[in-house]
Image (cartoon, rainbow, N blue to C red):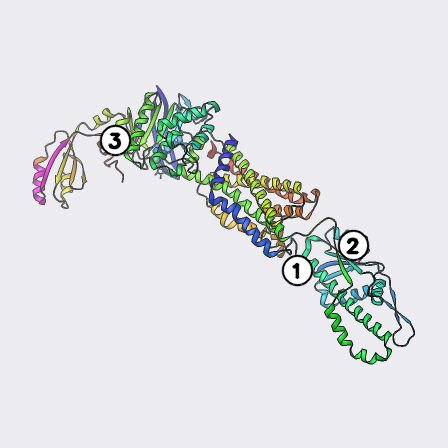
Amino acid sequence: MALLEAIELSKTFQKHKAVDDLHITIREGEVLGLLGPNGAGKSTTISMIASLLEPSRGEILYKGKSVLKKSEIIRKELGLVPQEIALYPEFTGKENLMFFARLYKVPKKERAERIAEVLSIVGLSDRASDKVEKYSGGMKRRLNIACALLHKPKLLIMDEPTVGIDPQSRNHILEMVKQLNTKGMSILYTSHYMEEVETLCDRIAIMDHGSIIAEGKKQDLIGMVQDQDLLYVSVEQQVAGFEQAVKEIDEVLFMEREDFRYKIGLKQQAEILPELFTLAHEYGIRIQGIDIQSPRLEDVFLHLTGRSLRDE
Amino acid sequence: MIVTHAWKDIKRMLRDRKALMITVLMPTILTAILGLSIGNMMNGNTKLETIPIAVVNQSEVASFKNNIQSGETSDTPVDFAEIFIENILASEDLQDVISYEQLSKERALQKLENGKLSTVIFFPKSYNQEVLNVMNQPSSKQVEVTLYQNPDESLHNEVIKGVVESYTNQLSKSVIAQNTMVTLMMKEPKLQQEITSSMGEVIQKVNETNRPNISVMREPFGDIESLSGMQYFTAGMAVMFMLYVGGYSAIYVRDEIRSGTYNRLRSTGMSFWHLAGGKFISTALLVFLQIIFLFMFEKLVFGMEFTNIYLLLLMIVITALSVSCLSILLTTITVVNQETRLNELFQSVIIPFLAMVGGSFISISMMPEPIQMFGHNVINGAALQGFTYVMQGYSFSELFGPILALLINGLIFLVLSGLIIFRRKEVFR
Ligand SMILES: Nc1ncnc2c1ncn2[C@@H]1O[C@H](COP(=O)(O)OP(=O)(O)O)[C@@H](O)[C@H]1O
Ligand SMILES: [Mg+2]
């Protein structure tokens, strides 16, 4: 069943279309990954879902009811983890939690218990009495999440919750998200890290330039690029013109360079090796190795947009 | 919910070292420096125009008996009060400084009360006779001229007092000289020649001794007292630095917007009323505590007088409430226009400007009329007037003006922020 549905959602900032005719569905009990590069419009979409920002056009339904008409229906059941560290650094972890627990109207009797609970979920119980300004980046991120869990939300929206932290904290957070989901929480997980979304999410929506360009289960998405092969070609040196020449081969869909390695997308079962060697010879390039791989999620984005999802 | 928001801001402020330095430490230090250095002079209204005074001359003409040279007595009528009026007040030298009129005592005091006069100089009925008595008999009772003065104008008062004193000093010096001579000549008529020649010496001696028996009494009019510099600057700094507290509550919102915390607050269902209500309560309480602290500090350290603690508390409460309204306006503008530079502008330009025209540093009567008008009625100027009135001993009914001005200020801030939020409703869906 659809817990949340955004229909024809659009947001224009002074002529700039940040979100453009977007459709998205979050099903009850799933982790939906919203994947897209910086500036794709992920945060803007989230702000509209959380009814912090008025859409220019479109509708948002929570459990079939319009959020735009009555924002209260979603607010009580929504936990929002903002992209920024939205905390009071001069307060301790516990004071931050106490403040937000009051705002979320957690009954007085349950507050202490709830706070202890979320502290243990995010693994900050022993640092609860320290001021947040003394926390490491990873600890701040974890407290940032804890504050959104106090009122036991049905739907948790996380906007890039792992930006700029150490791998350990990151793993902790990913593990935690899985745990919360097992206990029945529906989660919208936004990221521009492929691996996170790949390991975490049941379904994935890929966003670019304000709209969803692909959506489905991980395997379905990868299936979209199943009909292509990936050829990795390692070379000793780069020579101007070689890349352009290879791209002009009919069977080549795209070509990317990472240092001394080319990643070439081919039409399925295309035979370009003889041509490739001829070109290499022409340009005086020595090919050191060749590797053929099946595509990963990352390649879906590349396939759809011709650009890499990696940090620009 | 509102209380939760308010308490959060109070806690932030109390932990914000920079904010505490600006709102508590700075005014305390400035008050001490200014209050101690300016001492007793400063007061509200010092004008450059002529000083309006009235003379009440009830003295009766007395007779001076000339029996020195001929042995006979001849009566010369003398009127020292009239001499003062004709030769001093009416002199060309003083015309630009003092404008005087002669009035009955009732009429003069009435005009003084209405603030139309700076001083009433009062010569009692027996004045001339008493001066003569002192001439004839140096030990006789002291002669008094009474000055009724409007305490709002202490600088003027000093001028008038100076003029009257210099006359009476002159008078008493010649009185003493004359007494000395008369006594000597009576004893040794033969020495008359010598005495006359040594007169200069005598007068010089008198000048050195200089113990005038004719004194000027200053009578504060009603119960109103002059302000000490400490009192004035305590109030002046309090009303200036309270504006920073109001500013901080908007700065905190701006920080919340920048850090994304504001979105989190909104996601908990915070409405405009929660935000504005929280700001109202937190600012009112913080300003209240701030001003109480400043006044208590100056009292405990420098022994400053409150004069009337209940009226002072009332003024502090009303002032704090009107600063709260200001903080709501600043917060509203910040929330509606998140890019606004208003908060920086408020701290660096608007507050110093308001402090200047509101009279926190210099008396605003030096300024052009329209600015004075603004300075008297703008939030900090009105509060300053209220505080100085209380410390001068004015009664509740006389505080009505400043209180009304403060309430109107608050109302204007609220109406403005209401208009802004009404026109940009989408900011608080
Ligand atoms: N308040 C705003 N005013 C103007 N442009 C905005 C505003 N918020 C976001 N944008 C623009 O909208 C686009 C999408 O931004 P955002 O939703 O933050 O992307 P993402 O979260 O995917 O990185 C960006 O080009 C951004 O510059
Ligand atoms: Mg974003």
Quote the CA–CA distance across marks 1 and 2: 22 Å
Q: Are marks 1 and 2 in contact (CB under 8 Å)?
A: no
Secondary structure found at label 3: helix
Question: Could you say which is closer to the camera, residue B121 or residue B40?
Answer: B40
Q: Is residue B15 visible?
A: yes
Q: Is residue A150 visible?
A: no
Task: Give the number of the disc on residue B14.
Answer: none
Q: Is residue B304 left or right of residue A144?
A: right
According to the image, label 1 marks what residue? B48
Quote the CA–CA distance across marks 1 and 3: 80 Å
According to the image, label 2 marks what residue? B108
Q: Position of residue B8 (x, y in %)?
A: 48, 35
Kind of residue at disc 1 = Leu
Kind of residue at disc 3 = Glu
Residue under mark 1: which chain is it in? B
- On screen, B125 above or below A244? below
Q: Which residues are magenta?
A: A274-292
Q: Which quadrant would the N terminus of chain A be assigned to in this image?
A: top left
Give the residue at x 12% y 29%. A269
Q: How many marks?
A: 3
